[in-house]
Image (cartoon, rainbow, N blue to C red):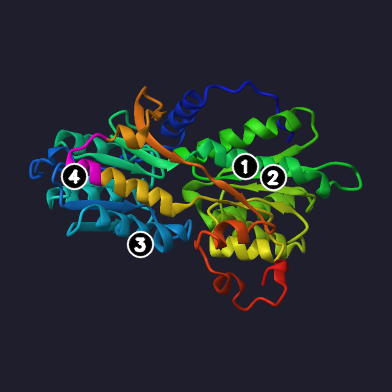
């Protein structure tokens, strides 16, 4: 299908529309917040010595357990010496995440750091925490509640812009003899605010080319739960429907990009199609070095985790956080303005891996080049 010209709404209104659609069409679960009678007051985080850290899953991206988990624990331990960290992973289950946070608060968690599995379904966590003066830091993914205390993440619209800008800068290299460029768009979960922001950012760059048919979208989907398996199925269907006539695939993250590449390999198209990604995972970076993936977006997670540590320390000490948020706020769909710390993402391709993820110590050359032939990507 061809992508129709459209008028872009302000991003928070579009997010609200999409989130409302999710509620109506997909019956998003809000879970059960459970009893709150046994939860002690968090005293707004002051003198807090038990911090709950709650991550969303282990499968959609390697980053959660390999990067965020240890970096968050290190930053919080540094912020509050002797602190007890109550760590849990929801394993892709929103109801489980609500149960984990409820249990954590009952057991004395007095500051919560939550990377929501579902931006909408996590709202009861905030409601429960607010009732007991327990600050909630929405980590990486904005929880759609106007009562979230703080939001620490990256400029997520910018992520989509970087992905799309790479396509704009390079799509002509993939034009067919018939002078056309067919593009598939595989976005993340529609219940993750970040996925919506990535899409909005990408379309702000791509839409002018789509409007003139310089690029033609043959399929555009949001992928439930950021499922890598579903992404592969989606790509296989696109290839079948279009008789393998695909030149560009916008993929929202590296995990799904790896599955898309598996589908392309089966069609003998790996390395012949522009494929985007995000998260600068080891798998994604290795695919870039091998010429199977074109780019990724690196988000310096160490900075993100340190921002959480700085906030936790300020809350514990009872000091002003304005020097950390610097007046930055992020709107929620229901009118909230959440004090925010947002870092800048970085576009990474085969030409600047050394100057970015290697230079920062995010990953080592030995890990990226393990079992790859010497000279791979002019890097190994």
Residue at point 10%, 40% (across, down): 41
Q: In what quadrant of the picture does the C terminus appear? A: bottom right
Residue located beneath label 3 in the image = 70
Q: CA distance from mark 1 to mark 4?
A: 36 Å
Q: Secondary structure at mark 3?
A: helix
Q: Secondary structure at mark 1?
A: helix
Task: Residue 162: give its label.
Answer: 1
| Left or right: 339 in relation to 9 | left
Q: Earlier in the sequence, mark 2 or mark 4?
A: 2
Give how far across and how far down residue 312 sits, in percent: 25, 46
Q: Earlier in the sequence, mark 1 or mark 3?
A: 3
- In contact (CB < 8 Å): disc 2 and disc 3: no
Q: In what quadrant of the picture does the N terminus appear? A: top right
Residue located beneath label 2 in the image = 166
Span of residues in magenta: 313-320
Task: Residue 316: give its label.
Answer: 4
- In contact (CB < 8 Å): disc 1 and disc 2: yes
């Amino acid at each position: 299908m061809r992508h129709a010209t459209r008028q872009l709404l302000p991003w928070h209104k579009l997010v609200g529309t999409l989130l409302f659609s999710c509620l109506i069409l997909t019956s998003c679960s809000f879970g059960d917040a459970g009893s709150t009678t046994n939860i002690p007051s968090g005293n707004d985080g002051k003198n807090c010595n038990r911090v709950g850290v709650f991550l969303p899953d282990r499968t959609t991206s390697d980053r959660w357990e390999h990067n965020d988990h240890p970096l968050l624990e290190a930053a919080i331990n540094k912020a509050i010496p002797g602190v007890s960290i109550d760590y849990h992973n929801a394993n892709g289950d929103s109801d489980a995440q609500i149960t984990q946070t409820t249990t954590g608060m009952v057991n004395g968690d007095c500051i919560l750091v939550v990377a929501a599995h579902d931006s909408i379904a996590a709202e009861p966590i905030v409601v429960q925490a607010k009732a007991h003066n327990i600050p909630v830091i929405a980590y990486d993914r904005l929880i759609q509640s106007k009562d979230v205390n703080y939001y620490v993440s990256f400029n997520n619209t910018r992520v989509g812009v970087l992905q799309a800008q790479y396509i704009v800068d390079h799509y002509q290299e993939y034009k067919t003899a018939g002078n056309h460029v067919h593009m598939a768009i595989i976005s993340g979960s529609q219940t993750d605010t970040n996925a919506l922001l990535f899409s909005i950012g990408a379309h702000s760059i791509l839409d002018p080319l789509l409007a003139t048919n310089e690029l033609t979208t043959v399929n555009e989907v949001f992928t439930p739960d950021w499922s890598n398996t579903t992404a592969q199925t989606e790509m296989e269907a696109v290839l079948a429907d279009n008789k393998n006539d695909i030149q560009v695939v916008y993929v929202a993250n590296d995990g799904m990009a790896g599955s898309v590449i598996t589908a392309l390999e089966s069609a003998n198209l790996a390395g012949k199609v522009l494929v985007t990604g995000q998260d600068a995972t080891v798998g994604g970076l290795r695919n870039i070095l091998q010429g199977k993936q074109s780019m990724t977006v690196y988000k310096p997670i160490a900075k993100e985790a340190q921002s959480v540590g700085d906030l936790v320390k300020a809350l514990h000490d009872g000091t002003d956080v304005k020097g950390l948020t610097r007046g930055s706020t992020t709107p929620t769909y229901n009118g909230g303005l959440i004090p925010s710390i947002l870092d800048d993402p970085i576009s990474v391709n085969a030409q600047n891996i050394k100057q970015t993820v290697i230079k920062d110590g995010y990953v080592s050359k030995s890990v990226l080049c393990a079992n790859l032939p010497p000279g791979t990507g002019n890097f190994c």
